[in-house]
Amino acid sequence: MSARLPVVVGNWKMHLSLDEAVTLARDVAERAPGGVEVGVAPSAPYLGAVAQALRGSRVGLSAQDTHWEAAGAFTGEASPAQLKGVGCRYVIIGHSERRQLFGETDAGVAKKARAAHDHGLTPILCVGETLAEREAGRTLAVTLGQLDAAFSALRPEEAAASICAYEPVWAIGTGRTATPEQAQEVHRAIRARLAERFGAGVAAQVRLQYGGSVKADNAAALMAQPDIDGALVGGASLKAAGFLDILRAASQGARLP
Ligand code: PEP
């Protein structure tokens, strides 16, 4: 298996005041351990200020969403060119909250993934099933369907450089985490599907994050799984101490060359 540097990104969603966001960014930037790639995703109005706070550090800036067009009459939206211009390295695409609350579709996710690469952003492509879908035995059908769409407009080298986050919807913000074995089963299937589509070499390079109530006390066991290469963290990324514990767990479990 090729070595993959773990990548952990904190999704701050629509939380924090400006001061809190800048303070948290500074804390993470100063104290993030080596051996793990780190990103934080503040809400859009804070991107510029958080970019300043992260300047000179190893911590990357992430947007929480993007439009697919480079510019235009799209009130309320931000383009990938604008996000790149303000200092973003990553962009989260297809988060379940976007899908469930704001009508995000697989077709939109595919266009956004294409646009992210066109503008030098690393997409974090989110996939995952609802509780009803899991209970109906449709976990892999739903997740792999979303995966196929998210990667549909990418060339192999772009796929290899993308991040995919498996986030079972029933585990997001609920305190209910997938067991390491449940998560690994889906991660293994995701990597196998990527191998079918792009070849084993590409599939071995794609970093697969787990997301859904990751905390300091479950992060190590999740990231010890062979196909789990990091985490997308919501609630536990809002306090520096807890997020830094997750980063240390990722760093200690790193499968480096
Ligand atoms: C998320 O929103 O991507 C997420 C994983 O949230 P939480 O960690 O709070 O479940």
Image (tube, rainbow, N blue to C red):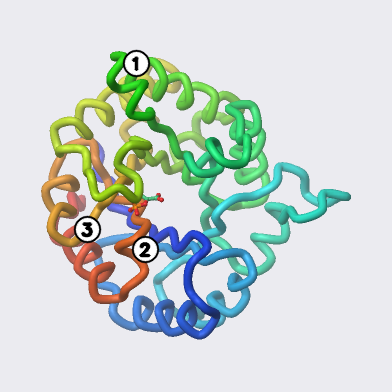
Tell me which corner region of the image, top left, top right, bottom left or bottom right, holds residue 139: top left
**Foreground residue among 212 and 119:** 212
Mark number displayed over residue 38: 2
The number of numbered discs placed on residues in the rendered structure image is: 3
Q: What residue type is labelled 3?
A: Lys
Q: Which amino acid does label 1 sit on?
A: Arg
The relative height of residue 186 versus residue 84 in the rendered view (above or below) is: above
Mark whose residue sits in front, 2 or 3: 3
The residue lying at 22 percent from left, 62 percent from top is 246
Q: Does the numbered disc 3 mark a residue whose Cβ is under 8 Å from ligand 1? A: yes
Q: Callout 3 environment at 10 Å: few (<14), some (14 to 19), or many (20+)?
A: many
Mark number displayed over residue 138: 1
Q: Does the numbered disc 2 mark a residue whose Cβ is under 8 Å from ligand 1? A: no
Q: Callout 1 environment at 10 Å: few (<14), some (14 to 19), or many (20+)?
A: some
Mark 1: which secondary structure? loop
Q: Which residue is disc 3 drawn over?
A: 215
Tell me which corner region of the image, top left, top right, bottom left or bottom right, holds residue 219: bottom left
User: Answer yes or no: do the residues labelled 2 and 1 have beta carbons within 8 Å?
Assistant: no
Q: Callout 2 environment at 10 Å: few (<14), some (14 to 19), or many (20+)?
A: many
Cα distance in 3D space between marks 3 and 1 = 27 Å
**Foreground residue among 118 and 30:** 30
Q: Which amino acid does label 2 sit on?
A: Val
The residue lying at 32 percent from left, 46 percent from top is 211
The relative height of residue 29 versus residue 37 in the rendered view (above or below) is: below
The residue lying at 32 percent from left, 73 percent from top is 239
The relative height of residue 35 versus residue 46 in the rendered view (above or below) is: above
- Is residue 123 left or right of 36 when viewed as pictured? right
